[in-house]
Amino acid sequence: MSGDYSHNNNQIDCGPRNNDPHKHKEKHKEHKNKDHKKDKEREKSKHAISDHKDPSDKKHKDKEKMKHKEGNADKHKDKHRDKEKRKEVKSADGKVKKEKENGFSSPGHVKSEPEDDFYHSPKQEKTLKREREEDFESEFKPKKIKIENDKAKGKKRKQENEDVKPKKTKNNKKGEVADGKKKGKKEPEEKWKWWEEERYKDGVKWQFLEHKGPVFAPPYEALPDHVKFYYDGKHMKLAPAAEEVSTFFGKMLDHDYTTKEVFRKNFFKDWRKEMNSEEKSKITDLKKCDFNEINDYFKAQSEIRKAMSKEQKLKIKEENERILQEYGFCLMDNHKERIANFRIEPPGLFRGRGDHPKMGMLKRRSRPEDIIINCSKDSKHPKPPPGTKWKEVRHDNKVTWLVSWTENIQGSIKYIMLNPSSRIKGEKDWQKYETARRLKKCVDRIRSQYHEDWKSKEMRIRQRAVALYFIDKLALRAGNEKEEGETADTVGCCSLRVEHINLYPEKDGQEFVVEFDFLGKDSIRYYNKVPVEKRAFKNLQLFMENKATEDDLFDRLNTSILNKHLQELMDGLTAKVFRTYNASITLQQQLKELTSPDENIPAKILSYNRANRAVAILCNHQRAAPKTFEKSMQTLQAKIDAKKDQLSDARRELKSSKADAKVRRDEKSKKTVETRKKAISRIEEQLMRMEVQATDREENKQIALGTSKLNYLDPRISVAWCKKWDIPVEKIYNKTQREKFAWALDMAEDDYEF
């Protein structure tokens, strides 16, 4: 490389200097009657002076220009040669660059290459070529010719040497390269279309799996000396184990949980288990404990974090990015896949949903000895922290989890899984909706079957048929058996008790009304009054005879019996498939009914949200109104009022302009009228968007649209609707959701039918 540089520098030197003996001879011929001193002065100033009156000087200048041109061409060739060498250096390091580019944007679909393979996709080659051409043009732009002194030459040499090194763009502003020019638009990365490949059989999920394991919660940092805990008004220094648990409670002092008796009782019981004998003997009553200074300390820490400088925040961001790049991806079957939750949950106090009987209990710190690792035998196994070891290392390619452990509150198994955009998750979603589509073909037969079973002589068959009717008609969850006292009192269809329903032969002008009122999944209340068919109503009356309020409504049925029966009706059929089918078919029907061809894009999106809301109501996807709802609605209403005032002003101005145009009758007045009309049209459109947004927010304040959109609605219905009506899919799905449903975006055409 050094030889090339010296050659290049020689080429540079040849341009401005006149060291060739032949050149000197020509010069002496031209200026034979001049003295030597004048000759030197002319040589120094030949490029500085733009015009020479002397014809011999002009001739001399033309010759010098030609020489400079030739020198420049040689320079260009050598510089181009250096660039070719740089290209080779880049390609040799291509893998590292590729991994960097693949880090974030769509890791679930990027194929990582073997280490000895330096192949770049055509798209990447194209981008590199474009950048090289831009650099070439910018560097060889025509410039004014000047004689360079030694200092300038040295500077130029240094600049060219720096050009050979890769340019650092770290501190550049976004969208700029080293020379200050804006980058072209980054070409989209090639996605891994796993849905076009053949699927594994016999339950195999992968052939090769390698990852770095989990990230553990940081160790406990003791409270500073000035932050004190008081018991019965006296300062008491706690041992680290007890102090750590005290901070969990101290952080939550302002929360409603700490006022609940069950929470306080469970916390105090588990806290005492962490105390030493001296602490146990002194601390006997939670009411005498003062956590206020601990609470104030963590509030102050929160404010300090909010007030961090940009540099401090950037440092934290960079560290999080480093951890993500190290632990947030795995290699599965030669493809780099994003991991969803690679961090082990830190210790704390269990909250649960609703009035959970175990709220306030201590979630203990998970340690390497609790962790089971799952990876392939031929992979590089994750290393545990120094001085520790894993509970177990498995090589099970029929499961999709990477890491598992058992939490101490309910003894449930926790998992580290792949991101929703991964192949494994995508395949599972796709299969789920395909099963629901198969149900569509035989749902009429199944409905006829359970209608017939209402007349069965066996009570268990009648109960199964009525339960299936509710699951189908009301999209109820099947419900699971739970051990007494283990979880909150939540029920599903099969576990309904007599107290959860009321029967009305006639109510609000409707016959055979059933009123449901119970806590469903996540302690969300399900309340609904619905008219049912007469025979189903009569069967419910029969099931409730001679039963107490706490007795099971379907005492001869459970989810296992129901799902076994559903498997006999259709392969792969479960109660959840009914829920998915009814949600998707409802969305499709609602979109057909609500979408009008004449509506603009905001109005069509409102129609989509209304169709989505019909599904959310069917599936009982409720939420509490956001705390900031009223404030945000007031802000939006103020904007609407301001926009209305702006529209009134614009209309007055238009009226005035029209009157002015009638008097003047010139082109300028006509143009003013047209401009004002366009302004009014623009303001009206903006106002309409705001009003649509206000309506949408009001209608959805207690409905969670996201749950059904992500889990129960076939995304191909939404994608097809977007394509049919030319709606940008970004208006329906955000970036994360588009990555999750990449298979649907690629598959669905505008004529797709669920």
Image (tube, rainbow, N blue to C red):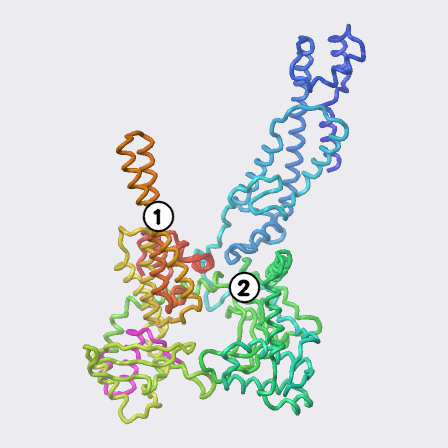
Q: Residue at x 33, y 40 (%)?
A: 676
Say whether residue 647 is left or right of residue 299.
Answer: left
What whole-number distance in Å separates the C-alpha atoms at marks 2 and 1? 46 Å
Residue 61 in percent (x, y) is at 68, 15
Quadrant in the rendering for residue 671: top left
Say whether residue 448 is left or right of residue 219.
Answer: left
Q: Within the magenta stretch, is there residue 453?
A: yes
Residue that extends furthest to the top in the rendered view of this protein:
33
Is residue 633 among what the camera can see? yes
Q: How many marks?
A: 2
Pick the front one: 170 or 660: 660
Residue 740 in percent (x, y) is at 45, 60
**Comes first in the chain, label 2 or label 1:** 2
Secondary element under disc 1, as helix, strand or loop, is helix
Q: How would you classify the magenta stretch by its main secondary structure? A: helix
Residue 307 in percent (x, y) is at 60, 62
Query: What residue is disc 2 on?
Result: 339
- Is 272 drawn above or below residue 727 in the view shown? below
Of tags 2 and 1, which is closer to the observer?
Answer: 1
Secondary element under disc 2, as helix, strand or loop, is loop
Quarter of the image with the C terminus is: bottom left
Is residue 322 among what the camera can see? no
Amino acid type at circle 1 is Ile
- Is 121 drawn above or below residue 401 in the view shown? above
Residue 297 in percent (x, y) is at 63, 73
Specify start and end residues of the magenta stretch as a single range: 451-479
Query: What residue is disc 1 on?
Result: 683
Q: Within the magenta stretch, is there residue 521?
A: no
Q: Which mark is residue 257?
A: none
Amino acid type at circle 2 is Ile
Pick the front one: 96 or 225: 225
Say whether residue 542 is left or right of residue 189.
Answer: left
